[in-house]
Amino acid sequence: LILSFDCFLQFGFFYFSPRWCEPLTHALCLCINFIGSTPPLTVGSLQYTLALHPEIPFSSALYHFPLYPSYRSEYESTAVTGRMAWQWLFDNYTLSVAFEHHDHNYKRTPPIRGSGVPNHSGEVDERGTVYVGAATWAVEPMELQAGRWYIANEEAAANGFCAVAVRRREMALRWVDEGGVVRDEFQVRSRLRNS
């Protein structure tokens, strides 16, 4: 349920920032065609928006091209450019969860913080962001590529969806397949120190 959202239009690109379950979570929906063409003003607006609600226990971003692909290479240009353009913002403002798309499968990372180095994709850090491939529906799922240091779940080649429940101290996520079976679940702790 989306209660309200802000929409920003700059240089032909836009993003909106819905607020649902207030005051428990703040979501940032990045609707930018290609990460590599993100204008500096948009990055500044994203930074402003992420800084707006430090009192809210959870924050999330939704966007198309994954920073941590499950099927394509982690060194593909959109992934590298995305990490360089956005990951520092996610780290600085303690983004709880990033919902990534494009690869048609479900994947979940451990919490990751970036390195800021183009050919190094970050490291596991409990203060980091969990990157979730938001699954697939009505298309043929792609297999997860084996050996990715950043993929925490074991398999995801099935149609399904990601269900999210937000409570004061945790955000619970479940990946449910088309048969209604919960195939993965995890919790994200509040980003507030005293929650």
Image: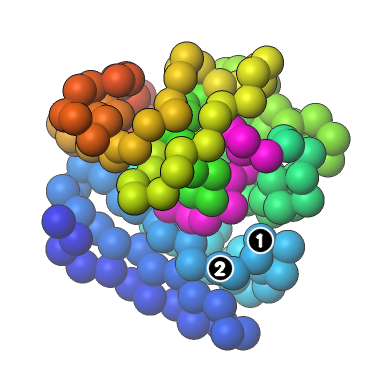
Residue 55 in view in this figure: no
Residue range corresponding to the magenta coloring: 61-72
Residue nearest the viewer, comparing 158 with 74: 158
The residue positioned 30% from the left and 20% from the top of the image is: 183
Q: Quadrant of the N terminus?
A: bottom left
Is disc 1 surrounded by few (<14), some (14 to 19) or many (20+) residues within 10 Å? many
Q: Which residue is mark 1?
A: 35
Give the residue drawn at x 56%, y 21%.
151
Distance from the alpha carbon under mark 1 to that under mark 2: 7 Å
Residue 8, position as x, y percentages in the image: 45, 77
Prevailing secondary structure of the magenta residues: loop
Q: In the image, which disc is placed on residue 32? A: 2
Most foreground residue, 140 or 71: 140
Expressed as whole percent of the image width and height from the top left, the position of residue 105 reads 46, 37
**Dot 1 lies on which element?**
helix
Left or right? Give the position of 54 relative to 149: left
**Front-most of residues 131 and 159:** 159
Asked if labels 2 and 1 touch by Cβ distance under 8 angstroms, the answer is: yes
